[in-house]
Amino acid sequence: MADDNKPLNFIQQAISGDLGTGAITKIVTRFPPEPNGYLHIGHAKSICLNFGLAQQFGGNCHLRFDDTNPEKESEEYVQAIIKDVQWLGFQWHGEVRYASDYFDQFYAWAQHLVCEKKAYVCQLSSEEMRKNRGTLTAPGTNSPFRESSVEESLELLEKMKDGDVAEGSMTLRAKIDMASPNISLRDPVMYRIKKMPHHRAGDKWNIYPAYDFAHCLEDAIEGISHSVCTLEFTSNRPLYDWFINSLPVPSKPRQFEFGRLNLNYSVTSKRKLKQLVDGNYVDGWDDPRLPTISGLRRRGVPAVAVRNFCDSLAVAKTDGLVDLSQFEFFIRDELNKNAPRAMAVLHPLKVVITNLPEGHLEQLPAPCHHELQLGDRNLPFTREIYIDANDFKEEYSKKLNKKLSPGRRVRLRHCYVIEADDYLKNETGDVIQVNATLVSETLGKDPIDGIKPKGVVHWVSATNCVDCDVYLYDRLFSDPLPDSGDKDFLEMIEKESLKILTNCKAERSLADVEIGVPYQFEREGYFCKDSHSGDSKKIVFNQTIALRSSWTDILS
Ligand code: ATP
Ligand code: MG
């Protein structure tokens, strides 16, 4: 939702002007994904912008699939996109819409343009067409089929549609201007032959409309007032207007272009994301390292953090490269305020509290959040517990005076103070057990003998906890601009971007948490239960994000 105190961006200004002059009475925007992949963070910017404009100006926003190319599209992508838009928190006006529902109308309008001598069937091969197109400095050459009769073009168009001519042998082209300085206007292709069924339209069509022909008409059919797209379509705008002005369309939408969102250390192109998925470089479209909406969701990133980030970005007439740490700021900000707290030990070291009896069980209430009223959960406190191996040192040192070491004390978070006595090692020299003594009457109080511990450590009961694996994620790419210049982004993949910690121990209350809901594991970071943990016995927790950004972020 737009912030009322922010100055209006150029699209808001245009809308405000149109409403002010009465040129339009209600704004209608749309988010028009092609179902050829899953949505990514760049799409989130477009979604927040289009739905946000409609909300801000009391209009409607449509969700419309631009499903005009059956070669790369599928129902799986349609369903994934619907889920993602809803998860982001937006509800479109009316039904989900599909460009394929307008195919009959597109065809009728194509015939209309032929009848008006504004379109013709061209029998040049794509190679010949490319040669005739000219260059930025030289005009193109007219096609020899440009002056074909209306009857001939209508007949051939029908044949193309019915599948009676070979793929690649003909196209329908708009008759505009082969000498135009704008190459988009040099008799662009409107229909090409593709003898393949469509996932919604079935096998009715052997021709499919080009983006430039279809998109403006989809907008016009739906009464879109402001058609917002990304900058690469700027030079196509005169063509958009040409179709709108040459046809008896029910409304005259206008196109506005804004800068794409690019994030460093990421790729935001469905084609490249698909390569990562198809090549098994990642664990599907929802791999938590991907900047896909489904990946962010699986990782535990709250939808509100994605929206806040997108709303913070400038809507400008230049493409932007945004630092990943800027996105991470919004994730941490949200999680710090709202994620419930819990404890999990990622590198467990057993501590036996020798002055407690076998079978000791005490339920200690601990608040789920230090500020929000989220209630308490109970921590089962038992004779054997786990602390993190990093919180124990064999030798005391002043520098590490918050650690547990023989003869030294720490407070167990939300629990008592303990003092280490001695420890056991295995054959390879690793400490495998610490024996400690509970300092009595220290629940919520300092020790009576006045020797206060410096450190507070997290812990879980060893006999009443949840076994889990923890997946730690780093940036997927080692290079900040993995797909710039002539770099091969597949070569830039960070080998250590996923680190799996097995045999981690989480507090009991984390056994039944909802999938994808992030918790702060105290002192460790933010984590959520993975959606794929359902079928295996062991729970997997995905790291959403570390508690703090690393020094490299702060220094860069
Ligand atoms: P990709 O290159 O990832 O395939 P696309 O533009 O082809 O993206 P579409 O499904 O056609 O993907 O996009 C739907 C809408 O989202 C379009 O209006 C498009 O302009 C917008 N969009 C896509 N990528 C970005 C981005 N990185 N930043 C902002 N908007 C984007
Ligand atoms: Mg596209």
Image (cartoon, grey):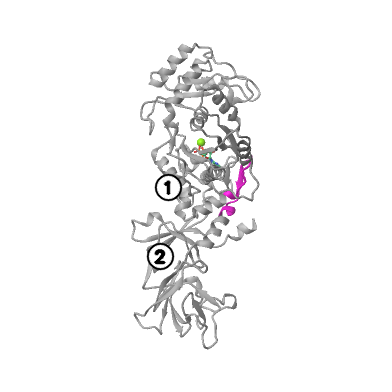
Highlighted range, magenta = 311-327
In this rendering, the answer to whether 276 lies above or below 461 is above
The amino acid at mark 1 is: Gly
* In-front residue for pair 247/533: 247
- Give the residue at x 48% y 74%: 413
Residue 169 horizontal/vertical position (percent): 45, 19
Residue that label 2 marks:
510
| Residue 398 painted magenta | no
Which picture quadrant has residue 202? top left
x, y percentage for residue 480?
A: 59, 49
Taking depth in this image into account, of 77 and 304 the one nearest to the observer is 304
Front in this rendered view, residue 287 or 64:
64
Q: Amino acid at mark 2?
A: Leu
> In the visual, does 71 lie left or right of 408?
left
The residue drawn where x is 57% and y is 44% is 261
As displayed, is residue 182 above or below residue 316? above
Classify the position of the C terminus by image quarter: bottom right
Q: Earlier in the sequence, mark 1 or mark 2?
A: 1
Callout 1: SS: loop
Asked if residue 123 shows in the view, the reply is no
Residue 552: assigned label = none
Q: Position of residue 406 (x, y in %)?
A: 50, 81
- Residue found 59% across the figure and 17% down from its top: 141
* Disc 1 residue crowd, few under 14, some 14–19, many 20+, Cα 10 Å: some
- Ligand 1 closer than 8 Å to label 2 CB: no
Q: How many marks?
A: 2
Q: Which residue is mark 1?
A: 284
Res. 21 visible in picture: yes
Q: Which secondary structure lies at badge 2?
A: helix
> x and y percent of residue 152 in the render?
46, 12
**Spatial CA span between label 1 and label 2:** 26 Å
